[in-house]
Amino acid sequence: MSEIITIEKVIHGGFGLARTEHGAVLVPGTLPGETVEAEYIGKRHGIEMVAVVRILEPSPDRRTPPCRHFGICGGCDWLFMEYSAQLELKKVIFLESMERIGRLQSVPDPELFPSPEFGYRRRAQLKINAQRKAGFFKRGSNDVVEIDNCPLLTERINGLMQAINDTPLLTEKTCNLPVIDGDTILASAPPVAGFSFRQTTVTLGKHSFDLIGTSFFQGNRFLVENLGKWGTQWGKGETFLDLYGGTGFFSLMFADGIRRGWLIESERKMVDQARENFRKNGVDHIAAVASSAEKMEQFLPRTLSVMVVDPPRPGLTRKVREAVARIAPDTIVYVSCNCTTQARDCGFLCNRAGYHMVASALFDLYPSTHHIESVIVLQK
């Protein structure tokens, strides 16, 4: 069954939302104001999903996607959209999440950090099919689309992907190949003979980071230093905590402004890398601790000046939110890749723990996708 519908707005997750006589529906691949013919395909979280059959009235912000794999490959879901429209929609979605989910009435207008649209991504997880060819998952499935060139990736990662597809380089039964493009060489797990190594180095200003293929590190090579430094203007004080600290990225960025600190990370391999990064950069006043976030209180002093939190997509657990409220740091710099869970957590901290929002920023780490990287500064 098809129906003519008009897109009201775009919501978190990148979906267009329309209201019909049957209720609200989600429409992937659309822009506000567009009129489309669509057919019903099922439900997502209880809301009807429809697929576009044809676009009857396109938005002036629609463009021809500059990639022949668009619509088949599972990435780049906003590649059909002009970049200025992408930025505006991300800002609207962020503010709406803060107001609707967080129930925050006074949200500072976010500072926007745009990125070059292409060649920005230095970190990826290549998918390997049964024929030992590389690419990414097909949209909506676990089938691998063989790809030689992705416009978002750096030249070296694209070169590795093309080499794998031209020559049988992978002898191990690898389904995923995580890879990071460093200053001069690629690191991947496992290394690919002649193309990548076990470890690489990324230099940001005066700091350098040793990374392996599986290390978590922000993928946008143009914005990552800005992301790390933006919150430091509020991040000075006696004591400091880097929660979900990974390999020490935020710790090193904040190190000059604090007297002593702790990094807490649950993955021991990352903790070992953080310790090596601290040693390499001459930072001896921050201790890296292998622990879950829920147990952080046992490692911290009675008072805390600055806390940086950069949780995974689900955000802070209830136990962590309550622990943060008890610790009551003077300043919280909350970094998030999911503004809906960030809104929930900041709503708790502002409405129930005595904080207020003093600044926010959006870093467009992933152009041509719906993903938003947002940073919020909270103070007592």
Image: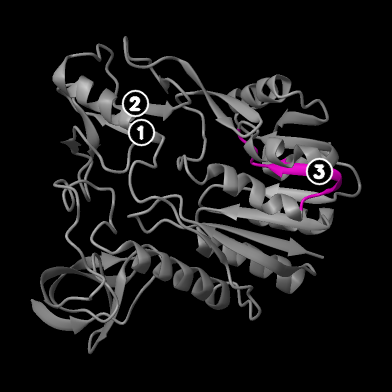
Q: Which residues are magenta?
A: 235-246
Quarter of the image where one finds residue 181: top left
> Considering only order in the chain, which callout, 3 or 1, is on the residue closer to the N terminus?
1
For the question of whether residue 332 can be seen, the reply is: yes
The residues bearing labels 3 and 2 have C-alpha atoms spaced at a distance of 37 Å
Amino acid beneath label 1: Gln
Say if mark 1 contacts mark 2, CB within 8 Å.
Answer: yes
In this figure, which residue is indicated by the disc labeled 2?
Answer: 177
Is 309 a magenta residue? no
Calculate the distance from the C-alpha at mark 1 to the C-alpha at mark 3.
35 Å
Quadrant occupied by the N terminus: bottom left
The structure residue drawn at horizontal position 14% and vertical position 69%, both measured from the top left corner, is 52
Could you tell me residue 165's position as x and y percent? 17, 23
Q: Secondary structure at mark 2?
A: strand
Q: Which residue is mark 1?
A: 125
Display colour scheme: one colour
Q: Is residue 240 magenta?
A: yes
Residue 66 in percent (x, y) is at 19, 51
Q: State which quarter of the image contains the C terminus.
A: bottom right
Tell me: 347 left or right of 13. right
Q: Are marks 1 and 3 in contact (CB under 8 Å)?
A: no
- The amino acid type, in three-letter code, at marker 3 is Gly
Instruction: Tell me the residue that label 3 is attached to.
Output: 257
